[in-house]
């Protein structure tokens, strides 16, 4: 099993780099430059290519091998990083990002989305049912570690590490990962796609896979409240006296470390034969309780004189709340991805990449929806109504679990 998990870990780590760049670095830098919460939130529109993975997932299923798609997309990411190395951002006089850089970041997301389809196809075909728990732990942990290195790491080292050197290092990392994808023995054993009778009525065939409708509804809603709160809470702490470098480290390294710890614990529990749906039910209740505490803290911060400056009790409570929610979120993510992969393994092999891409696209859409609109809602209605809505949305996945089909148990 280690021969499978080690190359998957390296590839999922580099897959997390673009997300870390845009979720950990850009929002803090843009907010520190004075951009509104609305404009910071709408910058998440750079993730748009991830929502169209279904456009090329059938190609990965039917044209060429997943290993070839994985190698070419990873090498292309290295090329885009090489171009970004030639475009360092200006330090003053510009409120947003240059148009050329926005275009390259969109290309970076496009390449990462193609890589994601190919890598998930490799994982679905490579892992045995008994390996799903450890496999999804490696997937989630490595991805988040890559996001942390590219997000919080940048905020810590950007003053001493130039933008060109940074992206040249990222380009070299991608090219090494492409070589790993092409030469790893476990990946070379994957079969080439066979002709399929499932080319017509694609959506109907996908939805006919047992458990698909329920899984699609669950992954679309299970992160709505969590993502809205986690994207807005650090920015509100910035408004209440937290410094951008310190907050960047906590929202980068600190929270991701807690998320990785939660994901690792989830994998350990699944490896000990915990049922993923039972684990989800327990952790979702804990997550709801944590969000109640975070919302209460936010309401208190709106009172006169309250702040999260150095040495205050509220500062410690706020950071503890931030880390706790990411720890529980990591547990939830590992269990949910295990359910998704189990559902996709019930599909015919010729549909597995497209099936998993459908579920992963809906999962991402659910996360991006509130992640993007949270700033707009906060600017329009204020933080208090927003967090009340987040609490209501966090109860939806608990209701969904009561309708889970037996095929996914």
Image (cartoon, rainbow, N blue to C red):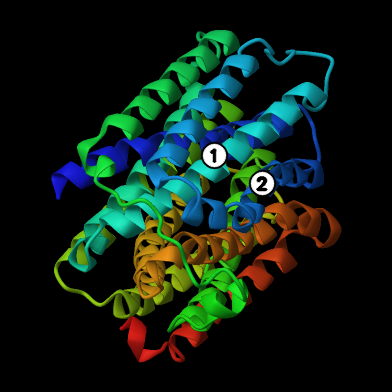
Q: In x, y percent, where is residue 240?
A: 66, 42
Residue contact between numbered discs 2 and 1, judged by CB atoms under 8 Å: yes
Q: In x, y percent, where is residue 171?
A: 49, 19
The structure residue drawn at horizontal position 45% and vertical position 72%, both measured from the top left corner, is 289
Which sits earlier in the primary sequence, circle 2 or circle 1?
A: 2
The structure residue drawn at horizontal position 70% and vertical position 41%, both measured from the top left corner, is 46
Q: In x, y percent, where is residue 165?
A: 52, 9
Classify 315 as above or below 338: above
Residue 49, label in figure: 2
Answer with left or right where residue 111 lies relative to residue 388: left
Classify 374 as above or below 252: below
Q: How many marks?
A: 2
Residue at image mark 1: 112
Task: Judge the density around disc 1: few (<14), some (14-19), many (≥20) Cα neighbours within 10 Å.
Answer: many
Taking the image as drawn, is residue 364 in sight?
A: yes
**Quadrant containing the C terminus in the rendered view:** bottom left
């Amino acid at each position: 099993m280690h021969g499978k998990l080690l190359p998957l870990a390296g590839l999922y780590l580099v897959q997390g780099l673009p997300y870390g760049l845009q979720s950990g670095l850009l929002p803090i830098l843009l907010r520190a430059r004075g951009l509104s919460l609305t404009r910071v939130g709408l910058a998440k529109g750079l993730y748009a290519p991830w929502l169209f993975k279904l456009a090329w997932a059938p190609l990965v299923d039917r044209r060429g091998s997943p290993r070839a798609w994985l190698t070419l997309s990873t090498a292309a990411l290295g090329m885009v990083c090489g171009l970004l190395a030639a475009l360092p951002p200006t330090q003053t006089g510009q409120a947003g990002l240059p148009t050329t850089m926005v275009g390259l970041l969109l290309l970076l997301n496009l390449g990462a989305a193609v890589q994601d389809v190919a890598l998930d196809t490799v994982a679905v075909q490579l892992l045995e049912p008994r390996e799903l728990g450890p496999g999804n732990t490696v997937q989630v942990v490595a991805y988040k570690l890559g996001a942390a290195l590219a997000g919080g790491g940048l905020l810590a080292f950007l003053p001493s590490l130039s933008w060109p050197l940074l992206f040249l290092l990222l380009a070299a990392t991608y090219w090494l990962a492409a070589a790993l994808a092409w030469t790893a023995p476990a990946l070379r054993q994957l079969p080439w796609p066979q002709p399929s009778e499932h080319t017509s009525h694609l959506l109907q065939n996908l939805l006919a896979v047992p458990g698909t409708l329920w899984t699609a509804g669950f992954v679309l809603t299970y992160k709505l409240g969590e993502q809205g709160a986690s994207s807005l809470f650090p920015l509100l702490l910035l408004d209440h006296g937290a410094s951008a470098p310190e907050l960047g480290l906590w929202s980068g390294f600190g929270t991701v470390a807690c998320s990785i710890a939660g994901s690792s614990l989830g994998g350990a529990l699944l490896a000990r034969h915990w049922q993923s749906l039972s684990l989800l039910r327990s952790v979702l209740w804990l997550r709801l309780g944590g969000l109640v505490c975070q919302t209460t803290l936010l309401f208190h911060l709106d009172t006169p004189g309250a702040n999260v400056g150095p040495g205050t009790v509220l500062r410690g409570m706020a950071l503890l709340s931030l880390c706790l929610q990411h720890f529980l979120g990591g547990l939830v993510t590992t269990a949910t991805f295990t359910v998704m992969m189990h559902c996709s393994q019930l599909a015919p092999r010729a549909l597995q990449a497209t099936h998993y891409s459908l579920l992963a696209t809906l999962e991402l859409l659910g996360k991006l929806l509130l992640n993007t609109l949270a700033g707009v809602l906060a600017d329009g209605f204020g933080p208090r109504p927003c967090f009340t809505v987040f609490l209501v949305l966090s109860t939806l996945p608990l209701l969904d679990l009561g309708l889970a089909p037996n095929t996914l148990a």
